[in-house]
Image (tube, rainbow, N blue to C red):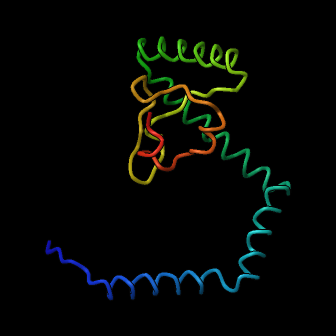
Amino acid sequence: MVRYRESAEGKARRMEATRERRRLYQGSPEQHARKLEVRRNHSKTESGKTSARVKDARKRAGLRRAALNMTMFDRFVYREMIQHAKDMETLSGEVHHIDHIVPLRHKKACGLHNSFNWQVVPASWNLQKGASNMEEYEV
């Protein structure tokens, strides 16, 4: 594979073409705002709530399947981390979660559900992090 360095003008043209495709896809700012509003309102409808329930159920099922493959050591560590999260909640007054350092599902990597990939973190931080910015949030 031959690699080449892209010129500044070429990069600028490529970035402008990407912005133009995005503008065409999203439509006018009013159309884009309307699409976002429809998406927000969908989560309040019965079918939107059902979609969210199905998504949550799939996530729980995946974690259950992963839990079946845990070693005795992983189970022990998991129980200890649950207790540690409860202790941290008692001390700080803030809810804590067990977080996967490398997300279980991410476009760049696939983390494992084992003791080497867990950490106890504040819930607000974990919910904000989601499955993004793995390098930024690693402890």
**Is 12 situated left or right of 68 in this image?**
left
Q: Residue furthest right?
A: 45
Q: Quadrant of residue 24?
A: bottom right
Residue 115 screen position, x and y as percent: 43, 22
Q: Residue at the spot x=45%, y=87% of the render?
A: 17
Vertical side of 2 occupied by 71: above or below = above
Q: Quadrant of the C terminus?
A: top left
Residue 95 screen position, x and y as percent: 69, 26
Q: Residue at the spot x=38%, y=47% of the render?
A: 109
Nearer to me, 35 or 126 = 126
Residue 91 screen position, x and y as percent: 67, 15
Nearer to me, 78 or 29 = 29
Vertical side of 53 occupied by 73: above or below = above
Vertical side of 80 occupied by 2: above or below = below
**Is 25 situated left or right of 69 in this image?**
right
**Is 70 situated left or right of 131 in this image?**
left
**Is 7 situated left or right of 20 in this image?**
left
Total numbered badges shown on the rendered structure: 0
Q: Residue at the spot x=42%, y=30% of the render?
A: 117
Q: Quadrant of the N terminus?
A: bottom left
Q: Quadrant of residue 12?
A: bottom left
